[in-house]
Each structure stands twice: as C-alpha cells, then as structure tokens.
Image: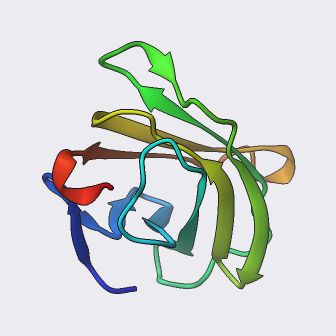
C-alpha cells in the first residue's frame, strides 16, 4: 500500500504494532467522503512478518472525545488473500479524532487492535 497524507498527524496506511501483530489499515478509496459508506483494507501479519490467516473479528469504533460510536455498523466482509481483510460499512459523519477497534471472536478471541487517527477538512470531500 502507498502512503497517503490524508489524515492530519496520521499517515496512511495506519501502522500499529504490538507484541503479536503488525496491522496496516487504510480506506480503499481516497479521499474519504463524510456521510458515505466505504471499505477499508486491513493487513495483519504476526511479529515475524507472516500473514495471519483466518481471523474472525468484529468492528467497533467512534469518537472517544465526543463519547459516541460510529454512525454505522462496519463488519468484516472477507479475507481476500492470506492476512488481507476487507471491512465494509465504515462511515464518518464529522471531522476529529476517530478510532476503529478490531475485536477477535471465536478462535481469534486473543486478537485486539485499536486504530486511531485524525480526520480533517484537508482529507475529505
């Protein structure tokens, strides 16, 4: 994925690492349009760089500073290649600091990742 400087203070893709996982995430289409549904590509590798396959996770999120969730109910759609997942139904209705949480379910219950970013006037339509 190419880096896109669409979020203030946050280069895309969003890269997050912890002891077990490396997660890269970015919207499939640029720029992001407020109040429209879009999809994100999520790439998940283990700490050695190998794709993490067959994860099952729910998607939640919102604006913690405003104490509200996402205005939509995004969900995991498919694993298009090993470790490459598509989530659909993501919608942002205002500018500010957002987070998306990927929460493992079933046999993936040990998986959890929070993606945090700023959405501003310069990166939306």
- Give the residue drawn at x 27%, y 46%: 119
Q: Quadrant of residue 95?
A: top left
Residue 99 location (% of width, % of height): 41, 38
Between residues 105 and 4, which one lies in front from this camera angle? Answer: 4
- Give the residue drawn at x 34%, y 65%: 15
44 relative to 9 in the view: left or right? right
Q: Split into 4 quadrants, where in the image is the C terminus?
A: bottom left
Colour basis: rainbow
| Residue that lies at the very extreme toward the front in this rendered image | 125
Classify 21 as above or below 45: above
19 relative to 4 in the view: left or right? right
Q: How many marks do you count on the picture?
A: 0
- Give the residue drawn at x 56%, y 85%: 50
Residue 77 location (% of width, % of height): 78, 62
Q: Quadrant of residue 81?
A: bottom right
Residue 58 location (% of width, % of height): 72, 43
- Give the residue drawn at x 79%, y 44%: 105
Q: Split into 4 quadrants, where in the image is the N terminus?
A: bottom left
Between residues 6 and 110, which one lies in front from this camera angle? Answer: 6
53 relative to 52 in the view: left or right? right
| Residue that lies at the very extreme toward the top in this rendered image | 67
Residue 43 location (% of width, % of height): 54, 74
Classify 113 as above or below 43: above
Between residues 114 and 17, which one lies in front from this camera angle? Answer: 114
| Residue that lies at the very extreme toward the left in this rendered image | 9
């Amino acid at each position: 994925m190419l880096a896109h400087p669409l979020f203030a203070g946050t280069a895309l893709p969003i890269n997050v690492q912890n002891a077990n996982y490396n997660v890269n995430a970015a919207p499939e289409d640029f720029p992001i349009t407020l109040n429209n549904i879009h999809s994100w590509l999520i790439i998940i590798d283990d700490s050695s760089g190998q794709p993490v396959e067959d994860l099952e996770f729910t998607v939640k999120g919102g604006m913690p500073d405003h104490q509200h969730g996402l205005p939509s109910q995004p969900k995991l759609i498919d694993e298009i290649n090993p470790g490459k997942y598509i989530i659909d139904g993501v919608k942002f209705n205002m500018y500010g600091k957002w987070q998306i949480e990927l929460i493992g379910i079933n046999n993936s219950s040990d998986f959890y990742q929070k993606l945090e970013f700023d959405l501003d006037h310069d990166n939306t339509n």
